[in-house]
C-alpha cells in the first residue's frame, strides 16, 4: 500500500495529501530502501527515454548524422520548448533530413511559458518559443530518435509508433533486459505523444536505472553507448527539461542521472552508489514536489552533495500564496524510507577505502579533463559485507540476483529464458541451472 509522501498545509491544517511509493534498488538487484508498494506495476512514461534511445545510438546514427552531444541529450528529453531547445531540434531536422511534420503528435505550446515554469524560484534563463508546433511538443526529441532508427531499418520514417515496428521491438527488448523483466510481463499502453509506453513493477524500473548507472555485466559496445548517452545528458542538463528544474540540478552532477515522466513518475540513478531510484505519486501530481521529494531521499541515503540537496529543496516554491499575495500555507515531505542496515555498513566500508585514493589521470587526455580533477575513481566492485560476499560475487558475474528479504539462498530460473516456468515476479532471477542452484544451496548448508 502506498504511503503519504507530501502534505500541503493551509494554515495549520493539512488540506491535501499526496500518496505514493519509492523504490531504491542496487545494480545487483537488492532492495536497498523502500516505502509503499514497490511491486506495483506502473507506466514508465517519459522516464523510459534514456532506454528508448539506446537502439538508435547502438546503430551509430548519432555518428552517421554527426549529432553533437547537445543534440544527443535532447533525444532523451521532455524539453520545455525554450529557444535553446528549438535551435538543437532544428539542427537535428536539417542533419537527418527528417521533416518534423511527419511526427505523429499534434502541435503543442512551450512549457517554459506555462504555469509550471512560473512556480520555479528561478526562471531568468527560460526563453519560451511562441506559438504552436510539433517541435515544441516536449517529446519531439524522442520522436526524432525513433524516426532516425525507423528510417535506417525500413527506409521510411512512417510507422515508428506501431508496437510491431522494428523500432518498438528493439526498445521493448532493451527495457526487458535492463529491468530483468520478461517481455510477457511488460504491459503496453499508448503514451501522451502517441507511441507505446511500458508498464512494469517499480522495483524492476529502479533496477533498469541502476543498470544504466552501473552496466557491469553488459557488452562493451552496449556499455559504451550507455555511458556516452549519460555523458551527453550530464554535459547538457538544460536539454532534458530546462534550466533550474530538478532534472537540471541532478543531471549537472556527473555522478547522477534523472528523467521524470508524466503523471507522477520520477526515475534516478546514482553511479557511485550503483543505485536506481523510482518515485510514483498516485495522484500523478509530482512536478512541483520533485525537488523536495528527491532532496529527502538523498538526505536519508546520506548522499554527500549537500549543496545539491539544498538546491533541490528550493527549485519550486513550497509556500502557498493566495491571490492577494499573502502567504497562507506550505508543502512539506513527510516520509521515512525503510533502509536496509547493511546499506550503511557497506557505505562506511566503501567511504573508508575511498579516503586513501586520489584520482590520477591515465592519459594526457584525462589530465586535461577538468570534470575529472579531484574525484576518486568510481569503483566497479559491489559493496561487500561478509555474509553477502558469495552472493554479490554471483551478482557481479550475472549469475544470480537476489533480494536480502528473501535470503542469500533464494534462487529461481531466469524468467527471461524459462517463460513457461512459474515465477512469482521478475525481481529475483538466476541464470544458473536449477540443479546447480540446488547443489550450491546444499553445499552452503553443509558448510554451515
Image (cartoon, rainbow, N blue to C red):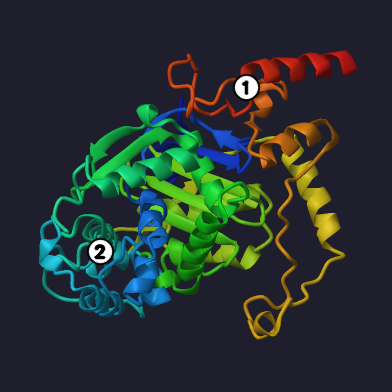
Residue drawn at x 43%, y 38% as measured from the top left: 176
Q: Which residue is mark 1?
A: 433
Residue drawn at x 56%, y 48% as measured from the top left: 218
Position above or below: 310 against 446: below
Q: Evaluate whether residue 274 shows in this view.
A: yes
Q: Quadrant of residue 148?
A: bottom left
- Mark earlier in primary sequence (1, 2): 2
Task: State which mark lies toward you, 1 or 2.
Answer: 1
Q: Evaluate whether residue 329 shows in this view.
A: no
Position above or below: 129 against 141: below
Q: Which residue is mark 2?
A: 144
Residue 305, horizontal then vertical, whole percent: 65, 63
Tell me: 395 left or right of 444.
left
Closer-to-camera residue (19/226): 226
* Mark 2, secondary structure of its residue: helix
Tell me: 436 left or right of 145.
right
Amino acid at each position: 500500500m502506498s504511503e503519504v509522501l507530501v502534505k500541503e498545509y493551509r494554515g495549520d491544517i493539512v488540506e491535501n495529501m499526496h500518496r505514493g511509493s519509492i523504490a531504491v534498488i542496487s545494480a545487483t538487484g537488492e532492495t536497498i530502501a523502500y516505502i509503499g508498494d514497490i511491486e506495483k506495476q506502473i507506466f514508465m512514461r517519459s522516464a523510459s527515454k534514456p532506454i528508448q534511445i539506446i537502439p538508435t545510438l547502438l546503430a551509430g546514427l548519432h555518428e552517421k548524422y554527426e549529432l553533437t552531444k547537445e543534440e544527443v541529450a535532447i533525444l532523451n528529453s521532455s524539453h520545455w520548448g525554450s529557444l535553446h531547445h528549438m535551435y538543437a531540434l532544428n539542427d537535428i531536422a536539417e542533419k537527418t533530413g527528417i521533416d518534423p511534420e511527419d511526427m505523429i503528435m499534434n502541435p503543442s505550446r512551450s512549457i517554459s511559458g506555462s504555469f509550471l515554469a512560473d512556480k520555479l524560484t528561478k526562471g531568468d534563463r527560460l526563453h519560451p518559443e511562441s506559438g504552436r508546433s510539433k517541435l515544441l511538443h516536449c517529446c519531439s526529441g524522442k520522436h526524432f530518435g525513433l524516426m532516425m532508427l525507423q528510417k535506417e531499418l525500413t527506409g521510411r520514417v512512417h510507422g515508428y509508433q506501431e508496437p510491431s515496428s522494428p523500432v518498438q521491438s528493439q526498445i521493448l527488448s532493451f527495457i526487458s533486459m535492463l529491468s530483468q523483466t520478461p517481455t510477457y510481463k511488460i504491459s503496453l499502453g499508448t503514451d501522451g505523444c502517441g507511441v507505446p509506453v511500458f508498464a512494469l513493477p517499480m522495483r524492476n524500473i529502479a533496477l533498469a536505472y541502476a543498470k544504466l548507472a552501473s552496466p557491469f555485466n553488459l557488452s562493451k559496445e552496449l556499455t559504451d553507448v550507455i555511458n556516452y548517452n549519460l555523458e551527453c545528458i550530464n554535459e547538457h542538463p538544460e536539454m532534458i527539461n530546462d534550466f533550474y528544474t530538478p532534472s537540471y540540478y541532478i543531471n549537472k552532477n556527473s555522478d547522477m542521472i534523472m528523467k521524470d515522466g508524466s503523471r507522477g513518475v520520477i526515475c534516478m540513478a546514482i553511479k557511485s552508489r550503483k543505485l536506481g531510484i523510482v518515485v510514483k505519486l498516485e495522484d500523478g501530481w509530482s512536478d512541483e514536489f520533485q525537488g523536495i521529494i528527491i532532496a529527502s531521499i538523498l538526505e536519508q541515503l546520506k548522499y554527500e552533495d549537500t549543496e545539491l540537496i539544498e538546491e533541490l529543496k528550493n527549485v519550486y516554491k513550497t509556500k502557498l500564496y493566495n491571490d492577494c499575495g499573502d502567504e497562507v500555507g506550505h508543502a512539506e515531505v513527510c516520509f521515512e524510507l525503510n533502509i536496509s542496515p547493511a546499506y550503511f555498513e557497506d557505505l562506511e566500508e566503501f567511504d573508508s577505502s575511498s579516503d586513501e585514493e586520489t584520482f590520477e589521470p591515465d592519459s594526457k587526455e584525462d589530465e586535461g579533463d577538468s570534470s575529472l580533477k579531484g574525484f576518486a575513481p568510481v569503483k566497479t566492485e559491489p559493496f561487500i559485507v561478509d555474509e553477502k560476499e558469495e552472493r554479490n560475487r554471483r551478482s557481479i558475474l550475472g549469475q544470480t540476483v537476489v533480494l536480502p528479504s528473501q535470503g542469500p539462498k533464494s534462487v529461481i530460473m531466469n524468467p527471461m529464458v524459462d517463460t513457461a516456468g512459474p515465477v512469482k515476479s521478475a525481481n529475483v532471477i538466476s541464470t544458473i541451472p536449477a540443479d546447480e542452484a540446488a547443489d550450491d544451496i546444499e553445499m552452503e548448508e553443509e558448510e554451515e
